[in-house]
Image: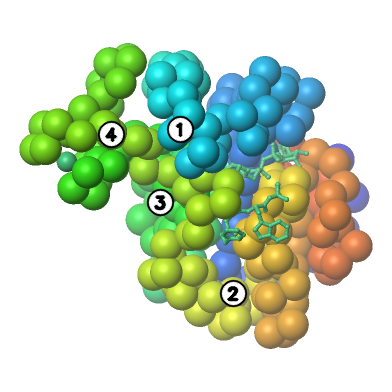
Amino acid sequence: MPTDDHILLARRHLAAARKLTILTGAGISADSGVPTFRGADGLWRNFRPEDLATPEAFERDPRLVWEWYNWRRELIATKQPNSAHHAVVELEQRWVDRMWLITQNVDGLHRAAGSQRLSEIHGNIWKVRCTGCGVVSENREIPLPPLPTCRLCQALLRPHIVWFGESLWEEEIHRCDEALRDCDVFLVIGTSGVVYPAAGFASVAKEAGAMVIEINLDRTPQSNLVDLSLQGRAKDLVPLLLYPA
Ligand code: BV8
Ligand code: ZN
């Protein structure tokens, strides 16, 4: 647990921040029981990323990839946002249009908690996209058929998620870039900082003059770069930032 004066210092920088940008990763959902990708209980531990979260894997064996996503949809459907998600909503209610949330998470828990000003840069596990006509729709069927097809054109559906080797959506990248270059505080919560381009966001914000604060169970490759590293569980630490400096 970080020292009280570290928490106080974080509160002080937050209180003075004209604009606040937040980046979250799987660690913020870990406290809701959603397995992370690279942790001890890691989701990836059972599956190697290059085996499943790539367009090549989907091309080769769409049934296997859908089996994995169906398993994750079933698991995530039973999870609720935790106090860290709710604290992020509270920050949004205070900073309103001076705050932006960037999440790498596809679990939809930020939206479920009430976050509205956010970019889901890796997509959302509750959305599907047609490989034929490209239509994106929300679909909460559990489980989806082994090879779900589009109601409009009968082509195969895929998760509306950014896989490794796929580019992020232009408009999201543009929105993130704006939020990174124009914030006074960049708060990074629960990410291992290994997946690009999100792993490069802390240095973009820092170069633009932001104070970077990291909340994580462990140290990460970003820890040397950040101004303040608060080690502990997101569900315990993020709510502490809500109190007055
Ligand atoms: C792209 C969707 C252009 C699947 C995901 C530059 C250099 C090197 C490589 C690249 C590069 N640019 C592009 C690449 C390739 C690749 C990449 O970065 N590879 C890495 C592995 C080296 N990037 C891409 O392909 C990206 N596309 O850049 O387009 C392009 C195009 C073609 C060719 C080149 C470039 C696309 C990246 C998106 C991939 N999709 N997910 C799915 O989710 O089903 S990534 C996957 O990792 C998840 O989305 C996840 O969000 C993301 C990051 O993981 P984390 O969220 O950080 O989770 P992790 O488990 O790793 O860590 C959890 C952390 O929480 C830990 O630090 C832990 O300590 C902490 N924690 C745990 N519990 C708690 C906690 N903290 C606080 N409280 C707790 N309780
Ligand atoms: Zn279609």
Q: Quadrant of residue 33?
A: top right
Q: Amino acid at mark 4?
A: Leu
Q: CA distance from mark 3 to mark 2?
A: 18 Å
Question: What kind of element bears circle 2?
Answer: helix
Q: Position of residue 232 (x, y in %)?
A: 80, 40
Closer-to-camera residue (46/219): 46
- Sequence order check: which comes first, mark 3 or mark 4? 3
Q: Position of residue 103 (x, y in %)?
A: 53, 52
Q: Position of residue 5 (x, y in %)?
A: 87, 58
Residue, far left: 152
Mark 3 neighbour class, 10 Å CA radius: few under 14, some 14 to 19, many 20 or more: many
**Way the structure is coloured:** rainbow
Label 1 sits on residue: 58
Ligand 1 within 8 Å of disc 3? The answer is no
Q: Between label 3 and label 4, give the one nearer the viewer.
A: 4
Ligand 2 within 8 Å of disc 4? The answer is yes
Q: Is residue 152 left or right of residue 38?
A: left
Question: What kind of element bears circle 1?
Answer: helix
User: Up-down: is 80 above or below 55?
Assistant: above
User: Up-down: is 140 above or below 233?
Assistant: above
Label 2 sits on residue: 180
Q: Amino acid at mark 3?
A: Ser
Q: Amino acid at mark 1?
A: Phe
